[in-house]
Image (cartoon, rainbow, N blue to C red):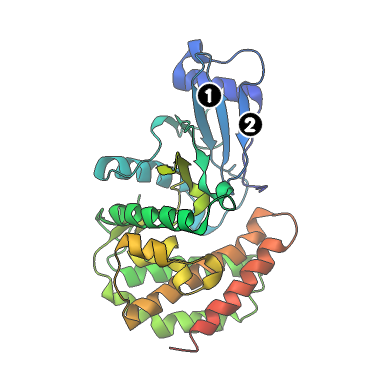
Amino acid sequence: MESITKNRQPIAVLRAMVERAYGPGEVPDGGDWCDELGHGWFNVAYRIRLRSGRAVVLKIAPPPHVEVMTYERGAMATELAALRLVREHTGVPVPVVDFADQSHELCDADWFFMEYLDADNLGLLRDKHSPPERAAFNEALGALNRALNEVRGPHFGPLTGPGFPTWRAAFTDMIESVLRDGERRDVDLGHPYAAVRAVIAAHADTLDEVTEPRFVEWDMWDNNVMVRDGKIVAIIDHERAFYGDPLIEAGFTGSEVSAYGDSSAFIRGYGHGPTTEPERIRRRLYCLYLVLIMTIETAYRNFPGTENYDWARERLNETMALFDRR
C-alpha cells in the first residue's frame, strides 16, 4: 500500500543502520540484499539479508515533516512497548526485536530491526483457504487475542502514558482526537460532526462498566497474522495497542457491521458468551471509532484514488444507523 507516511531511506543509510545494529561484519555487500515489504499501510519495512545470510526486517517510522493523525504519534515507541509486554506476559508469538534506535542520528525517525519470519501473510491467503480453514484460523486468533487481553495495565489509554483513570475518559479522548483530526483537514463524513459527537455523548455511560485496564492489540486483522503449515506463527504490527476494553478488538467488529467479516469463529475461540445490551452499544461505539479513523486517515495518507474513502464512508453510514435501533 502506497502512503506518504512511508519513510524510505537510501542504500547508504540502510547499510549504516545494519552496521549500528549488527556490527560491520554483517553489512551486506553486492546487490539484491534489500527488498521493501509493501503490504503495510504506515511504516516502511524492509527485508534485509545480512552478510551472514540471515534475513531480518527493518521498520522505520514516518518522517517528522509528515503530519499523522493524533493517535499515530509515537506509534513506534508504542509498538516496542507492546512487543515487550507480549513477550514478557504471554505466550502469544511475536517477532524478536534485535535492535532499536530512537537517536535520529542516522535518519530523521525512530527505527528498529527484528527477526524475519519465514511464513505467509494470512491476508494474502484469504482467497486460497476454504471456509472451514478460515474459521479455524479465526478461532485460533480469538484464543490468542484473549491471552493478550489477560495482561492488566496501570491505566487506561496509551501504553507509554500519560493515561486516564477511567475508560470513559480515555475512549472519549481517543475518539474526540480523531474528530478533531477530521475537522483540521475538513473531511466530509456525510454527517455533521456535531451529530457524531451527540451519538457518542448519548451512549458514553456504557463505557463506565469497564473498570480494569487490559492490554488491547486492536489491529489483529488478517494482514497482521503470519502463518506456516496451517498454524499461526506470529502476530505483527503492534503500534496501535493501548490499555482499554477488550470488546474493542478487531475480531469483534463484524458482530455489528457485517462488512468487516463474520466474527462468530473469533468469538467462539475467544470464549465470549452472549453479549449484554450495554456491551452491544460499546461495540457500536468502537465500530464508530474505527470507521472514523478509516474515513479521516485518507486525508492524511494521500492514498491513490478514492476507493478507501468511499468504502469507509459506506461503513460510517451503516454504523451511524446502528444507533437508531437499540
**Which residue reaches farthest right?**
305
Q: Which mark is residue 131?
A: none
Residue at coordinates 65% horizontally, 24% vertically from top-left? 11
| 78 over 173 or under it: above or below | above
Judge whether residue 143 can be spotted in this image.
yes
Give the secondary structure at mark 2.
Answer: loop
Label 2 amino acid?
A: Gln
Give the secondary structure at mark 1.
Answer: helix
Position of residue 258 measured from the top left corner of the image (x, y, whole percent): 52, 72
Position of residue 235 measured from the top left corner of the image (x, y, whole percent): 42, 45
Judge whether residue 162 can be spotted in this image.
no
Judge left or right: residue 110 versus residue 303: left
Position of residue 279 measured from the top left corner of the image (x, y, whole percent): 34, 76
Q: Nearer the viewer, residue 164 or 255?
A: 255
Judge left or right: residue 99 versus residue 243: right
| 77 over 307 or under it: above or below | above
Mark 1 or mark 2, earlier in chain:
2
Contact (Cβ within 8 Å) of mark 1 with mark 2: yes
Disc 2 target residue: 9
Position of residue 129 measured from the top left corner of the image (x, y, whole percent): 53, 51
Residue at coordinates 50% horizontally, 52% vertically from top-left? 222
Disc 1 target residue: 17
Label 1 amino acid?
A: Met
Judge left or right: residue 136 versus residue 299: left
